[in-house]
Image (tube, rainbow, N blue to C red):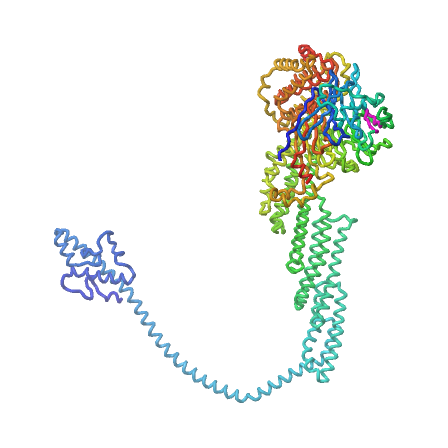
Amino acid sequence: MEDDAPVIYGLEFQARALTPQTAETDAIRFLVGTQSLKYDNQIHIIDFDDENNIINKNVLLHQVGEIWHISTSPADRGVLATCYNKPSDSKVLTCAAVWRMPKELEPGSHESPDDSSSTAHSLELLCHLDDTAHGSTACVTWEPTGDGKKVISLADNHILLWDLQESSGQAVLASSASLEGKGQLKFTSGRWSPHHTGTQVATANDTAIRGWDARSMSQIYCIENAHGQLVRDLDFNPNKQYYLASCGDDCKVKFWDTRNVTEPVKTLEEHSHWVWSIRYNHSHDQLVLTGSSDSRVILSNMVSISSEPFGHLVDDDDLSDQEERHPEEKSQEPPRDSVIATYEEHEDSVYAVDWSSADPWLFASLSYDGRLVINRVPRALKYHILL
Amino acid sequence: MAAGAAGPGPGSGPGDSPEGPEAEAPERRRKAHGMLKIYYGLSEGETAGRPPGSDPLDPTDLNGAHFDPEVYLDKLRRECPLAQLMDSETDMVRQIRALDSDMQTLVYENYNKFISATDTIRKMKNDFRKMEDEMDRLATNMAVITDFSARISATLQDRHERITKLAGVHALLRKLQFLFELPSCLTKCVELGAYGQAVRYQGRARAVLQQYQHLPSFRAIQDDCQVITARLAQQLRQRFREGGSGAPEQAECVELLLALGEPAEELCAEFLEHARGRLEAELRSLEAELGPSPPAPDVLEFTDHGGSGFVGGLCQVASAYQELFAAQGPAGAEKLAAFARELGGRYFALVERRLAQEQGSGDNSLLVRALDRFHRRLRAPGALLAAAGLAEAATEIVERVARERLGHHLQGLRAAFLGCLTDVRQALAAPRLAGKEGPGLAELLANVASSILSHIKASLAAVHLFTAKEVSFSNKPYFRGEFCSQGVREGLIVGFIRSMCQTAQSFCDSPGEKGGATPPALLLLLSRLCLDYETATISYILTLTDEQFLVQDQSPVTPVSTLCAEARETARRLLTHYVKVQGLVISQMLRKSVETRDWLSTLEPRNVRAVMKRVVEDTTAIDVQVGLLYEEGVRKAQSSDSSKRTFSVYSSSRQQGRYAPSYTPSAPMDTNLLSNIQKLFSERIDVFSPVEFNKVSVLTGIIKISLKTLLECVRLRTFGRFGLQQVQVDCHFLQLYLWRFVADEELVHLLLDEVVASAALRCPDPVPMEPSVVEVICERG
């Protein structure tokens, strides 16, 4: 089974921000935000045609500043939030805002011209997540299962819960909490748990991971010294409600059971530099994707701690027709945790990786030099999981 | 006398022939001479003194056996002149005379002997005749005696018969009297306490009484006897039960009771019961010694006590039992075995408790001696009572103790190793307080290595006592095989080396990576220690072990190579971790310096920032530290002859080229293109890559980690014009000083270029500083 070659797309600018269009479940679509201090920044909407292996792109201008983080609403395909640097002479301040794409670029609107790359559209500002009082915003995360009305932003040492009202035209600060402690505490990353009916949020600051109850904005758990150095990113297992993965500057990827915060369930040490991004596959949580500043993307198969630990359950049925070809396959049971593939298409640090929201076998990774690579899970593994 | 008569002249012989006396005489003389010689056992040739080589068949040889006088004379007459003939004639005459006189003397001497022999024979004849007469008289006398005797016997015949009959009656009467007296006799015996006597009497009379019990008188006696016997038995029992009087006396009681026909089974049960009482008392006294309150005597004393008290008692009981109840057969033996097993088990439990107290102590020789005594003492009952398995159980205990000892030594070694590490930590911490230059790492390493080695040797020596020849259990299969190979070699030595590696590795996994709970110097030292183990020490220790404990066991043992590989892996991990820790220290410094500064509103650079100087200083310090323990390693050749100047010119010109396009407003693509093209030609840098065992590799690793951190931090910031220039100055400064530490200076160039290029990208107004100014600032700094 030959795997398809990766598809590579180059941006003109440096880029760090990548997200799939969460609300879109049919088309494979990623959003990339650029970082440029001298030119107008853009959001590239990248559509991937799986059948023909073709990339279509649309460019939206994002004139307010360079984009550090981007996230899309889980309910409305046209709504997204960015964290951006406001250019100013003496100070750098990162703000956050909620935007709406122009109508014609919304998926499903077939009347949009295909060669829209020539004409750059602008985003429509819905509202600012007005953080100036709280400091620079590191990231914005949407309530994963809700109606796209609730957003949490992390600004310096504050965690802010916003209610978007009047079809996202206005953001009202619903509640907030802040981290107290010695020194300058700063959130680096946060994720909203898809479990517990959307009441849990996890954040990372320095070497600690903290869980928050979104209703009371109080801390639920805290993993002190989760990593030896800074924690860069974290993600929730979509199928196991207490499982959490994190990555950081100690080059490690750790898996946690939040009920027992003293020891990680599992630790991987495959990267040779800081790990910047980690994502669980949305459907098959044994597939874990990590991106690192050693310019590599690694896809791992964490069977032992996934929600389907014994692989395909119908194994016995298809053994009959597979036996002749793979007599040794049976001896491999039970499968072990392993690195499935290391992708080396990038030549600069990879700051973001993410799975497509539409196709569970497809993922994108973005490196600082503006290279976006779209890859697929190896077919052999895909069939192994499916069959 | 007789010789004088034999003949006056030499010439006269018995058969003297008249013709040719000159020729004839020698011939006859010769013959006579020859016969004499044969008589005296001499061969002819020897006495003749004939010159060797002359032909014995030569007929002309005077002394030869085949001498022919005619031929000889012919020859003489023909060959010799007259004078010579005359000479030989006189010579011959002289010889003949000499021979004659010889013969005369001989005859003379022997004649005497003949005369005396004849006299003796005559005398003997006379004596024999007298003796014959005496013998005849003897014969007649004997005949008379026989006759008389026959007559006497005939007369005495019937009187003799009567006497015999009377004697029989007398014996019977004596027996009857004994029987009639028996009751009173028995009573007396019992009263006097002469139980043995009583039992003997009773035994003698029993059969007879049994036989004649149908006669009333005998019956009465029997009844009396039985009553007395019953009393006797009762008294014996009484005495037996009272015990106290010691095993031999009890044995006697039992013997008597048995002779009285008491039921053996019951007796043997009772006997064992009593023995149990005594032995239990012994056990109790042993237990009392164990007790917590009085200071326990040393283990040797304890086993001695146990050996003489309990084991001795058990031996006595067992031998007495086997003597007394041999008739009981296998069932009795089984009973005894069960008895011994049970008490033995309790004794063993006590011994084990005592030995367990000994586990903590360090003195092996005492323990081994105690075990030796213990084991030796149990051999006797073991042989006596093979079924009870005492010897096996004892061996088992000894083995268990030996195993525990091994475990104890392993613990001791581990503790010693940890102690060494603590010492090192203290030594590493102390000089810093005193403000001295640096701790003598090499010296510390030597100390640690030698102290561990001496501990290992001490442990080996201590454990070796178990296999000493004079120790009674050393020839058990366990101590010859498994103890040596599995216990000492695998369990103790290999186990220790493994645990040492693990302990060392655990420093790599310590969660406190940030604070660095372990001083980096310790990591470095351990890494070197493991490497030394890999190269030499492990094989040395194992050879030592194999020599001391001649391993005869065939069970598989860990090969040296596996251990070496483990040690090497540990050393590598430690060194890699050292690199990470040191890299982290410098990274943190750089990161803080980048994160905390306001790069937008910074002033025009005048100086290299202090933190960069600090980085260089720290790197130099690390270089020195590593240099104490590791060799230099190889660099790429170019660095040796690259002088400072060419280097800086080269690099700044390159920097110029690199970010020149970024502020020409042509196309934003160019920077990417340029950096991408550049990356195409440079190899991917593995930042946290495994290091080799040399200084350059270690330093390269540390510098790589630090610079990559700088790069990533720079990318997260936004720089003003002067901020960029400051980065430029800092990087140039680093370039000036860091290249000398690394294997490939190109690497430093690449990373620093990348930093400056990234800073330029993160700057809205990138105006680089003149390279010459940068150089001036750096040189001034």
* Residue shown at 73% from the left, 53% from the top: B350
Q: Quadrant of the N terminus of chain A?
A: top right
The answer to whether any part of residue B47 appears in the image is yes
User: Which corner quadrant of the image does residue A193 belong to?
Assistant: top right
Q: Position of residue B230 (x, y in %)?
A: 75, 74
Horizontal side of B151 relative to A239 (left or right) equals: left
The answer to whether any part of residue B444 appears in the image is no
Closest to the observer: B687 or B213? B687
Q: Position of residue A248 (x, y in %)?
A: 73, 29
* Residue shown at 77% from the left, 15% from the top: B600
User: Which corner quadrant of the image does residue B172 belong to?
Assistant: bottom right
Residue A45 vertical position relative to residue B141 in the rendered view, above or below: above
Q: Position of residue B738 (x, y in %)?
A: 65, 19
Residue B690 vertical position relative to residue B614 in the rendered view, above or below: below
Horizontal side of B644 relative to B73 (left or right) equals: right
Closest to the observer: B399 or B86? B399
Q: Which residues are magenta?
A: A149-161
Whether residue B743 is in magenta: the answer is no
Is the magenta region chiefly helix, strand or loop? strand
Horizontal side of A241 relative to B737 (left or right) equals: right
Q: Quadrant of the C terminus of chain A?
A: top right
User: Which corner quadrant of the image does residue B730 belong to?
Assistant: top right
Whether residue A159 is in magenta: the answer is yes
